[in-house]
Amino acid sequence: MNNDQYQICTHCVMDTTDPGIQFDENGECNLCTDFRENREKHNYQGETSKKQLDELIAQIKKDGKGKEYDCIIGLSGGIDSSYVAYIAKQNGLRILGVHLDNGWNSEEAVQNIKNIAKKLEIDYESYVLNWAEFKDVQLAFLKASVPEAETPTDIAIPAATHHFAKKYGVKYIISGGNFATEGILPKYWHYNAKDLTYFNAIKKKFATRKWSTFPTFGYKSEMYYKLVKGIKMVYILNLVPYAKDEAMDFLKTELGWKYYGGKHYESKYTGFIQSYYLYEKFGIDYRRATLATQICTGEVKRDDALEILSTKPYTDEKVKEEKVYIAKKLGVTLDEIEQIIELPPKWYTDYPNDEKKLAYIYDTYRKIFKKDKLANF
């Protein structure tokens, strides 16, 4: 870490577990000040947002004429993807749900996907990863001892959704990502999954087999899909009133949705990584980023957030069971999992990466297409 002493933001709850955090003279961090500066561009703004949504829906329908589907939505069984599917359906869009099957889905998530597809009357297809390859990819990132243990899934999801968009000639992928609940996330906690130089450096050093079918998605793939195939990623949850607790209650009541026990526990692996692995190895409590965002939006009081953060994000009993399950599924011993957790922490900066190059490419793209309203979602 860059910080010699512990410090916590006086406005939100972000702290020096983010090595890149900076504080002003009032003790406020750059993460929450950046959030406030960007909020106006991405947050729901009443009639203005409704008009933008109506225009976007009309454009999606227009571009979908003569095709089987208007849009693709990635379905994980989680709150965001389930609710965005509902919003899209309410607006009359013809949806193809795409589920990335990486072998880690909880029973609740699988049932949620089935219920959402059935009750909303939408088709869905699964993109099934080669398990032998995928577990080697995951083990490589664990052995690299970086926080990006979930990069293998995060890089495969856009590869899967764009694959089906191209297959069906669909021009829009609707993401469940949103500024209201995910506006704060330090890059040191989860560096850019699209950096293939970083990805391949870890592959070269830690992989034990060839990866011939694992799908990747770097900036070249993204530019091909955006500029050649004309596929846009849009974030309609930014254009509607969205509070996660209210959305969860609605999904439970109206769509038979079931809670899976914690943020991102729709995947057993993601739940373990975010609640235990990152917390114990790096001191990273993922709840901190969510709560910081909710403080900045006024949904949560800082004192209440601090009370939540005073407790561990996991239970010892559950973690013991999860370690056994994860070790067995990855084909390693429990001792090997423990040894991986005890390795000295590293960051993306400890490996070859294209951070500066990618920043230049995406900054240039945003400048060129800044007049395209859809490109800014």
Image (cartoon, helix red, strand yellow):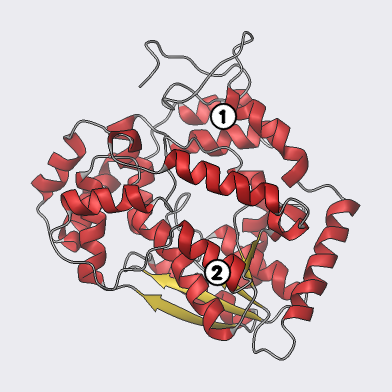
Front-lying residue, 106 or 372: 372
Mark 1 Cα-neighbour bin, 10 Å: few <14, some 14–19, many ≥20: some
- Tag 2, which secondary structure? helix
Farthest-out residue, right? 47
State whether residue 377 appears in this view: no
Q: Is residue 43 above or below residue 13?
A: below
Q: Is residue 36 above or below residue 237?
A: above
The disc labelled 2 sits on which kind of residue?
Tyr
The disc labelled 1 sits on which kind of residue?
Ala
Give the Cα distance between marks 1 and 2.
40 Å
- Residue 173: percent from left, percent from top: 61, 69
- Tag 1, which secondary structure? helix
Mark 2 Cα-neighbour bin, 10 Å: few <14, some 14–19, many ≥20: some
Q: Which residue is mark 2?
A: 225
- Location of the N terminus (image quadrant): top left
Left or right: 218, with 247 as reference point: left
Q: Which residue is mark 1?
A: 305
Left or right: 68, with 19 as reference point: right
Q: Is residue 332 above or below residue 198?
A: below
Front-lying residue, 112 or 5: 5
* CB under 8 Å between discs 1 and 2: no
Q: Residue at x 41, y 26 (%)?
A: 17
